[in-house]
Image: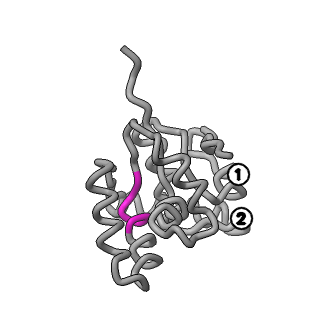
Amino acid sequence: MAALRSLLIDTGPLVAYLDNRDPAHNVAASCLDGFSGQLHTTSAVITEAMHFVAPDERGPALLAEFVTASQTLVHALAQPPDLRAAAALMGKYFNVPMDYADATLVLLAERVGVFDILTLDCRGFSTYRTQQRHALRILEHD
């Protein structure tokens, strides 16, 4: 039996998937509609996504429903050692740039051993490396 595929998910695809008017909606839908593995994200990504979907009255409920229905594992990464590690990464990649949500995904990749990511931020995530120098693999889409 094959192992369940795991994938990190960033803010952009979450928001695009929930908003069919988003220019990246079809890309996000093509990746997520057929995905049957385990999604992982961070509370920082959920917070950022909630901010972007909030202008739509149904946006927050749709995000909550998606996370619940997909059984996405949401990791906190907000304890002082995590904050220090995130801040160090943000400093290292200041010119890329890297925001806090991105930093938590890089930390999460190493923590859970999942290096495949669904993101719209190809520039950033093709540059970022974990503390052990692992590159993240951006999920290819049409």
Q: Which residue is mark 1?
A: 127
Q: Reply yes or no: does residue 44 show up in magenta.
A: yes
Q: Position of residue 27 (x, y in %)?
A: 60, 54
Report whether residue 86 is seen: no
Give the residue displayed 46% in from the left and 40% down from the top: 34
Q: What is the span of residues highlighted in magenta in the rendered image?
A: 41-46
Q: Which secondary structure type mostly characterizes the magenta part of the structure?
A: helix
Q: CA distance from mark 2 to mark 1?
A: 8 Å
Tag 2: Cα neighbours inside 10 Å, few (<14), some, or many (≥20)? Answer: few
Q: Position of residue 92 (x, y in %)?
A: 65, 61
Q: Nearer the viewer, residue 41 or 35?
A: 35
Q: Position of residue 114 (x, y in %)?
A: 47, 38
Provide the secondary structure element on which disc 2 rests: loop
Q: Position of residue 50 (x, y in %)?
A: 39, 74
Report whether residue 141 is seen: yes
Q: Reply yes or no: does residue 29 show up in magenta.
A: no
Q: Which residue is mark 2?
A: 96
- Left or right for 84, reference 115: left
Residue at the extreme top of the image, as rendered? 1
Establish if 66 lies above or below 21. Answer: above
**Amino acid of disc 2:** Val
The answer to which quarter of the image holds residue 42 is bottom left
